[in-house]
Amino acid sequence: MENQEAPKKKNKVLPIILLVVVIAGGIFGISKYRYAQHHEDTDDAQLDNDISPVISRVTGYVNEIRFEDNQFVRKGDTLVVIDNRDMRIKTEQASAALENARAGVSVAQANVSSAIANLETAKSSVETAKIRVWKSTQDFTRYQNLLADKAVTQQQFDAAKAEKESAEASLVTAQRQQSSATAMVEAAQKQVVVANSVVSQKQADLDFADLQLSYATIIAPADGYASKKNIQIGQLVNAGTSMFAIVSGNEIYVVANFKETQVGKMQKGNSVEVIIDAFPDKKVEGTVASFSAATGAKFSLLPPDNATGNFVKVVQRLPVKIAIKSDPSMKDVLRPGMSAKVSVLVQ
């Protein structure tokens, strides 16, 4: 009798266990379904921040490095000093050339003053010549009338005539000298314009030399961490050499790559829950800040072209920027590039 009752008890336990499993599975499935109706998740996400590469704009040897790798720096701090002796010499040469050009302006202005004085003298000569012509003409007319009356000799008349013609010739010469003096004034004034343009050019050369000299001192472009240092003291760096990078100290954010089928219900301002892989026990709150203007594939080096005969439809991913509320305890440990899981609450 006891052996017959034991199988009956076992037969009752199995259905109960199966029922409990089915109920639990149903509850789990319903909860997952309801969760999926109001959330969009992805683990294709990572922390990001603004990273500014610092590139040398001049060629020279590194004299000083005033920071350690991964050190926090402030905007405007001097981080690297490049040997600037050759650039300083070029600045001095440009400054000397500028002073010489300014002296040229003074000389040109003095030439203008001299040319104007010569013009005034020429004008006076013209006026004198006109008076002489007037007097000689009057004398010639008088002697001509007297000659008709036989009151003067032919010799006296010829002398008056010669004086008149000489005065007229002197007037023509004086007028030509005045025209030449006027042209000299105009030429001297143009030389002043040319000299001033040379000054402007030399000033630009000096400004450029000063600018190149300023590039020998590398300053921090923003607050942040100076990382990826790849220079050493005494190293020759060329213009365009990447020396280090500044990882901005501003608020860090998350870039999540959602499938295009997931972003239909998302809106700017949606609440987001972020779990960073390095700190799985801590949940970080955030909000959807913006959506990328194009899918990630379109920003790739070789974007795919669907206008081919071998087209295969692939679900694309759209980067979504998520602003997070940084926990003060995690502010100094979050780094760009860290992986994260993101869950967006949608309507």
Image (cartoon, rainbow, N blue to C red):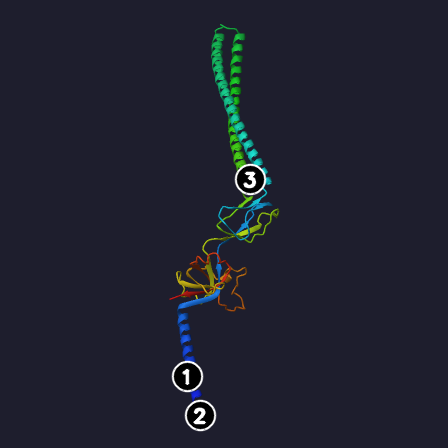
SS under mark 2: helix
Instruction: State the residue in front, 123 or 80.
Output: 80
Task: Name the residue located 48 percent from the left edge and 60 percent from the top edge.
Answer: 47
Location of mark 3 (residue): 209
Please rate how many residues cluster around mark 2, counting C-alpha atoms within 10 Å: few if below 14, some from 14 to 19, many from 20.
few
The secondary element bearing badge 3 is classed as helix
> Where residue 168 sits: x, y (%)?
51, 17
The residue identified by callout 1 is 16
The residue that disc 2 covers is: 2
Whichever of labels 2 and 1 marks the residue nearer the N terminus, that label is 2
State the residue lying farthest toward the front: 2
The kind of residue tagged 2 is Glu
Instruction: Check if mark 2's residue and mark 3's residue have beta carbons within 8 Å.
Output: no
Residue 263 seen anywhere in this rendered image of the structure: no
Q: Nearer the viewer, mark 2 or mark 3?
A: 2
Q: Earlier in the sequence, mark 3 or mark 1?
A: 1
Given residues 154 and 213, the one toward you in this image is: 213
Q: Nearer the viewer, residue 250 or 158?
A: 250
Q: Residue 83, position in %: x, y?
A: 59, 43
At label 1, the amino acid type is Ile
Toward the bottom, the furthest residue is 1
Mark 2 or 1: in front is: 2
